[in-house]
Every structure is written in structure tokens, then in C-alpha cells.
Amino acid sequence: MTTLDAGFEDALREDLLDEAESALADHARELEREASDRFQSYAAREGYDISHLWRDTSVSRVRRTNTRVSATVSWPALTALFEYGVDPFILEGNPTLAFEWLAPPAGTRPPGAPSFVVADSVNWGSVTGGISEARAIRTALQVVEQSMRG
């Protein structure tokens, strides 16, 4: 009969957590890279200057307890607008909205149009059709999940 050392389970648990910690750190960085690559392709395709989405992404260091490891990948505020897209909508003010239009996209501001507009509502996205969804993070998660499964 084989006898195991008294600390066998603790040593095994620590070894497994060491492996999980290392693997999770690699996968978190992989997720960041995959999503960044996808956001960059999306930005080039759509003509958006959204470089802050991949420049300001952060990966936390791996956190470890006695029974688990975790890491967080965070994207800047409003990333979801590009990840999920935005349909055109009417923005209504109470009592009125005021917009300053200093540098509109070329060709969208008619000659002689005022640079300061006051309106009760704005049909946002009527010219652009809204924002199409990037699916950069969701697709990157699928890629990393496949990588984790081997």
C-alpha cells in the first residue's frame, strides 16, 4: 500500500493553482490582443478613430485565493457602444437641446449652416445609420475559450 505525505493535498493544490495562475495571465493577455486586433480592423473598416479602445484597455494582475485565480480585462467607458452597436434614435430634450457643431464630417454641414444649433429633438444616426456592432470582445472571448480548451 502506498502512503502519501500529510501535505500531499496542499502541495497538489498549490501546484495546480500555480499552473492556473500562469495560464490565466497568458489567456488574459491573449484576450486583450485578440480584441484589440478586432477593434483596429473594425475602426479601419468603418473609418472610426477609436484608438482609445485598445490603448486604454487594461489587464489586472492575476488574483489568487486558496481555491481560485481570477483576472480582469477592462475596456474604457462607452466601449459597449461599438461592441454592440447603436441603432439610429431620436434624442429629445427638455425643454431644448443645444449642440455646437464645430467640425462636422466633411460634406455633412450645408453651406451657410449655423455652427450652433438649438433643437427640441435630434434624429441621431440618420446620416450614418447608427453605429454597427464590432463584436470584437465577444469574438475574442470565443477565440480565447477555444484556445483554453486546446
Image (cartoon, rainbow, N blue to C red):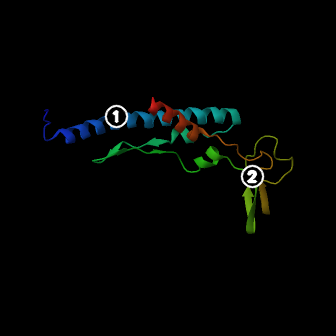
The answer to whether 8 appears left or right of 93 in the picture is: left
* Residue 85 x/y as whole percent: 67, 46
User: Disc 1 or 2, which lies upstream in sequence?
Assistant: 1
Q: Residue furthest bottom?
A: 95
Q: Quadrant of the N terminus?
A: top left
**As displayed, is residue 74 above or below residue 3?**
below
In this rendering, does residue 118 appear at all? Answer: no
Label 2: element kind? loop
Q: What number is the disc on residue 22?
A: 1
Q: Residue at x 69, y 49 (%)?
A: 86
Task: Give the residue type at disc 2.
Answer: Trp
The quarter holding residue 2 reads: top left
Mark nearer the viewer, 1 or 2: 1
Label 1: element kind? helix
Q: Residue at x 74, y 47 (%)?
A: 130
In this rendering, does residue 126 appear at all? Answer: yes
Q: Residue at x 56, y 32 (%)?
A: 37
Residue for badge 2 = 101
Q: Residue furthest right?
A: 111
* Residue 59 x/y as whole percent: 43, 41
The quarter holding residue 142 reads: top right
Q: What number is the disc on residue 70?
A: none
* Residue 109 x/y as whole percent: 82, 47
Q: Are marks 1 and 2 in contact (CB under 8 Å)?
A: no
Question: How far apart are the two marked residues, 1 and 2, measured between alpha carbons?
Answer: 50 Å
**As displayed, is residue 96 above or below residue 59?**
below
